[in-house]
Image (cartoon, grey):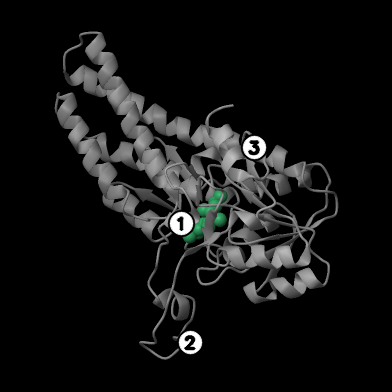
Amino acid sequence: MQVFDIVPVKYENEDLFVLDQTRLPGEEIYCKLKSKEDVWEAINRLRVRGAPAIGVAAGYGLYISVRDFDGDNLVKFGEKLRDVKNYLITSRPTAVNLEWALLRMEERYKEFCCETALNNDIDGIEEIERLKKVLLEEAHNIRIEDEENCKAMGKHGLSLLKKGMGILTHCNAGTLATAKYGTCLSPIYLGKEKGYEFKVFADETRPLLQGARLTTWELKKAEVDVTLICDNMASQVMKNGWVQAVVVGCDRMAANGDGANKIGTSGVAILAKEYGIPFYMFVPTSTIDMNTRKGDDIIIEERDGEEIYKMWYKKPMAPEGVKTFNPAFDVTNHKYITAIVTEKGILRPPYKESIKKLMDGE
Ligand code: MRU
């Protein structure tokens, strides 16, 4: 599919690029990230966004920020790596994939140190060069695994859907938000290949318009039937009987199944319950945070209020200096989630138990 020619994060000829999603759908421009500051800015400004894609960018971002280390001491290398990790982790607070990927890179560094200690290898330029290769490989693995996980979620997700269904989605949890294929849009692409003829309704997703700018862009590229609606039209579309399933992504799922996702998601879930429509949240295991017990403990990012009334308008569409409240995410209570789709299978309530089993590998 033509849409998969475009990947949000790519590492090519030793350079890191992200597709600048703030420029979509008008321009398809990749920007080169050369430093930790570039990576921080790209994540913070949503040039690269969507929990799994942020994780992929963070893995490579950490690597490119430490690869210039020119000493021969593993401990000093570790100090640099930790500094970069602690810096990048501050770029956005809600999507757990950011810290998940950074901690995974740090863990790989620690393993390497243990291995070299066991082999009695001494510090040296060669060891450091070997470590750099290992870290790049780990960044590649994060990307490759995410791609595989998205494919698997596509298969599991499709088993919940039927031919010709109307499907509503919020924000963008498609190929642009992951390494490739997307989480909740993955079954829609797979269904397209198999002739399912879904009719997708994309919420515009104020204030940053990921639904309007990104979801419709990628679905149109894939020639999926997509209709753009404003967020406040979802109820009417459901009432009309045009929606048989809601699919959304997730930025951080707590151990009890409460899931933080783009602001507006919880409202859609409540509406779906009212109209008796199944609500499916697509959550790779990299997005499940077992250290967060319940949704109330998830930190919700608050962004500059100017995004609400200035960013997409030639002139401010509200009085200058107006008081604003701009949370980027909300938490959907697990009681509204019909099923959680992971790469390892579909979870049903009670989620506390089913998530624990899955994460314990049972
Ligand atoms: O602020 P964003 O655009 O990064 O928010 C993205 C979302 O809320 C997605 O639904 C979520 O990250 C899942 S992406 C597979």
Amino acid type, callout 1? Asp
Q: Reading the chain from its start, which is encountered first: label 3 or label 2?
A: 3
Callout 1: few (<14), some (14-19), or many (20+) C-alpha neighbours within 10 Å? many
The residue carrying mark 2 has its beta carbon less than 8 Å from ligand 1: no
Q: Distance between the residues labelled 3 and 1?
A: 24 Å
- Please give the residue where the numbered disc 3 appears in the rendered image: 151
Question: In what element is the residue under mark 3?
Answer: helix
Closest to the camera, between mark 1 and mark 2, is 2
The percent position of residue 339, horizontal first and vertical second, equals 68, 47
Indicate the quadrant containing the N terminus: top left, top right, bottom left or bottom right: top right
Disc 3, disc 1: CB below 8 Å? no
Of 237 and 58, nearer the camera is 237
348 relative to 200, above or below = above
The three-letter amino acid code for the residue at tag 3 is Lys
Do the residues bearing badges 3 and 2 touch, measured as CB atoms within 8 Å?
A: no
Q: Residues within 10 Å of mark 2 (few under 14, many from 20)?
A: few
Of callouts 1 and 2, which one flags the residue occurring earlier in the amino acid sequence?
A: 1
Which residue is tagged 1? 20
Kindly report which numbered mark, 3 or 1, lies closer to the viewer in this rendering. Answer: 3
Sequence order check, earlier mark of 3 and 1? 1
Is residue 239 visible in this depiction of the protein? Answer: yes
Residue occupying the point 37% across, 56% down = 92
Residues 15 and 247: in front is 247
Callout 2: helix, strand or loop? loop
Q: Which residue carries the number 2 mark? A: 317
Residue at 34% across, 50% down: 39
